[in-house]
Image (cartoon, coloured by chain):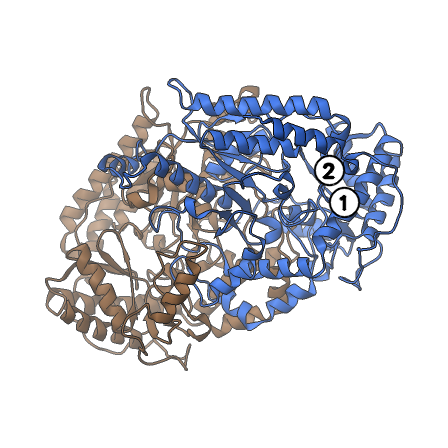
Chain colours: A brown, B blue
Amino acid sequence: MITARSFAAARACARSPLLRPVQHQRRSLATVSSTLFPGEPSAPHLVTSAIPGPKSKELSDGIGTFQENRAHGFVVDYAKSQGNWIADADGNVLLDMFAQIASIAIGYNNPDLIALAKTDEFITATMNRAALGSFPPTNWQELVETGLGTVKPKGLSQVMTAMCGSCANEIAFKAAFMAYRARERGDKADFTADEMQSCMKNQSPGSPDLSILSFTSAFHGRLFGSLSATRSKAIHKLDIPSFNWPVVAWPDVKYPFSQNARENVEAEKASLAAVEEAIVSSTKAGSSYGPVAALIVEPIQSEGGDNHASPAFFQGLRDVTKKHGVFLIVDEVQTGVGATGSFWAHERWNLATPPDFVTFSKKMQAAGFYHNVESRPSLPYRNYNTWMGDPTRTLQARQIIRTIQDHGLVKKTDEVGNYVYKALYDMIENGAGRGKVEKLRGENAGTFLAFDGNTPEVRDKLIMEMRKQGIHMGGCGEKAVRLRPMLVFEQKHADLFLEKLEKAFGQL
Amino acid sequence: MITARSFAAARACARSPLLRPVQHQRRSLATVSSTLFPGEPSAPHLVTSAIPGPKSKELSDGIGTFQENRAHGFVVDYAKSQGNWIADADGNVLLDMFAQIASIAIGYNNPDLIALAKTDEFITATMNRAALGSFPPTNWQELVETGLGTVKPKGLSQVMTAMCGSCANEIAFKAAFMAYRARERGDKADFTADEMQSCMKNQSPGSPDLSILSFTSAFHGRLFGSLSATRSKAIHKLDIPSFNWPVVAWPDVKYPFSQNARENVEAEKASLAAVEEAIVSSTKAGSSYGPVAALIVEPIQSEGGDNHASPAFFQGLRDVTKKHGVFLIVDEVQTGVGATGSFWAHERWNLATPPDFVTFSKKMQAAGFYHNVESRPSLPYRNYNTWMGDPTRTLQARQIIRTIQDHGLVKKTDEVGNYVYKALYDMIENGAGRGKVEKLRGENAGTFLAFDGNTPEVRDKLIMEMRKQGIHMGGCGEKAVRLRPMLVFEQKHADLFLEKLEKAFGQL
């Protein structure tokens, strides 16, 4: 249900001066220090006429003898990469604004992480991998409480660790299904004999026909449950059996938000109404899919094309899921850990009640989900596996969080993001990008920025042209360029990026 | 189809003197050196009257404030654990025959692994995590070829890395489904518009109704695809939606194999016939499940109770899957990496043609699957994800493999396993275990040994009694004790275990 409050908030947001496009000024951002990587390169270093160069190609061909290599961009010399700069096998050094598909947070060879790697605590944890759910190490409580625990989303007290974004989402699905059925059982907490037997045959009632609701162009992973909620591209899904789970159209909003407030409110209302309709009809006789136990949503649809919605939309999702007893899973695998200018992207929604589950991975290096004590399974061993996460990555996550906090990298990313957004806005509206790219996204979203090529070919050409200029970028969706710099991306890097982008536009 | 050849082989196997129970002799095993951990304890060190002790309990309660703690055995001091010995938070030191649910290969704080952790190569790989499918490191080919590549199962040339056993199985499922559909398409390699559109709605033909066939009491993981193939216990499956995939009864064999050859051959024939029936009927109109694209099987069903079958059975599975164009996935997540006395358990089947997929994880620390170039997807990005495995664990896997080879640990495990099997046989048939435990399994299976308590309560009591004696063991299935020592488990450890087990039987 869409409340009057939520849409008032959306309109206020749209009127905010923060979101109004302003003329770009090359002012200096006071809080952006340059102390993190004092020895970083100041400019790209290009030694081959094309990237991948001959050495990259040779190494990639070698890998191709034993595994898929057709998705290789180039082969990387990680030892020589530093901060925001990625070095390839041929000796090229590029400004990295893709960061291993948005999963490097604080720069290559960050000295804090290198120091961590040499500690006894790290070596012990890494080389003696615990089955965390049964034989946790003595420091586990302290490690989680001083690391992942310090960035618990507001209102969530529990954390379960996992291996990657896909499995973080899947174990959150499992927790949601168990909690949904527990609520249905009420006081009758015991499983019935019928449930115990039927689940062994993958049949209801033990294996219930419940569903997860997701949005068109959503990406939530590639394993069998998460892929059933993923709707990004056919290539991700073809030939793989899927659960018959429902999908609702992502709001067809226009950018920039601040100039399309009225239409966007209507688009979001339509999507919210469709969500409610999908949930309500799922419990009716004759529904082609089972009752919706949870809705999963990305704060910004990333792999699917960098699609945004307003805080009011997410408030509406919280309202409608709450109303119908559907769990809300916020997939922060790509948006989490500071890149949007707040530690969690969903912080900016100002929800009246927290999401039920918040999943993470990528820049956190550790994966998992936050939740509440109410959604713990009724019995041990229900949401369980051998490793239950990875102590190595949990230690790394703690250091990443500490480094982010020590250097104020979230605030810095917010500022640098606004700076880049405004410059890009000028360049696309009135400058070199005009008529070549469009639909700039990322107002008030840190460095989590994107724009579309006029065609997929223009997008692909721009990415290759930028690589020739020494800037490494990634695409997403059909024709979008997505910027995913690290949190150590500073004004000087932004200025270099903007300068090279202007040149690249000239080559299109 | 069951060939005459395969059953002749089974009978030969059953007649083999290796498999005939012999009187246990405390002979010395010449090849078992004691040089790996010269400073290892020689006896348990017990300081609390029960395990978990007070410190373990306190730490576990602390963890319980933010995550599930009811499956905790005890809390571990990994820094103080060494070789085969696990130290707990209270200062107890136990002989570890469970090894983090069968996932520690070469001992706690193995000096080779500690040395690896300090190398620049390791630190660079760990702290600069690559998106391996797109930006592999310059050493990737060399790393894989000198590590995972050196233990490729015979006949398989390709390897894809993953994060854990569940996702190794699931990406093997995906590869199998894609290869199955590719074969159906034949020369018409392009996807149809209908496939492209329907898969976005999770509907056929783009999301085809294909299935994976598995066995009763199988365990293949806990994510949505792998859990649909898992049939171990209701607690693993309750409340989780599952694919409607078929299941066939595991052969109802008797132990020891060598004394029940005739009945076991019949039981295995019945199971093979049921497999063929399930496959054939899956393609007929009116089948309640879709065509079987792949069959997945563990060489020894582990989590489901340590259930064995003969090489002839697996030869029969290869024959029948080959006959009907069904891919054979051998799940070596728990059996792989030496514990059964060969590097891969399926080596002992002497298959005429290799399995199509062999999955691994646990003791390898790295996870993934081996396969053939024919089962590569038609296009890149089809079986893809951000990390595509973990360079940290791939480096660790290489060192584990090297250490195993340097010290001949597979042969050693084979010898020690036979030694323990014979001693256990005596103890259960004629000694202290008689009438208390039964069904010893593991003839000619290295240290991958198991036996049942007469009741689940006897099993549980025995495990707790052994803990009091300073021996840490694990259970599986309904009432089995499974022995999962590391590959550095030597005769001296075996003798200690047998001595304590004899005492523990006296306490039952």
Chain name for mark 1:
B
**The residue tagged with tag 1: helix, strand or loop?**
helix
Identify the residue shown where x is 62% and y is 65%: A123
User: In the visual, does A18 lie left or right of B355?
Assistant: left
Q: Quadrant of residue A377?
A: top right
Q: Amino acid at mark 1?
A: Gly
Give the position of the C terminus of chain B as an image quadrant.
Answer: top right
> What crowding class fits label 1: few (fewer than 14 Cα within 10 Å), some (14-19), or many (20 or more)?
many
**Could you say which disc has been placed on residue A407 in the image?**
none
Which residue is rendered at x = 70% and y = 21% of the image? Answer: B263
Front one among A390 and A7: A390
A45 relative to B351, above or below: below
At horizontal 48% and vertical 62% (from top left) the residue drawn is: B141
Q: Which mark is residue B417?
A: 1
Q: Quadrant of the image for the N terminus of chain B? A: top right
Q: Could you tell me if the residues under marks 2 and 1 are in contact, i.e. CB atoms within 8 Å?
A: yes
Name the residue tied to disc 2.
Answer: B442
Residue B143 percent location from the top left of the image = 52, 63
Q: Is residue B352 above or below residue A148?
A: above
User: Relative to residue B296, is residue B273 depicted above or below?
Assistant: above
Q: Nearer the viewer, residue A91 or A9?
A: A91
Disc 2 marks a residue whose amino acid type is Gly
| Disc 2 chain ID | B
**Separation (CA) of disc 2 from disc 1:** 8 Å
Query: Residue B458 in the image: x percent, y percent?
Result: 78, 31
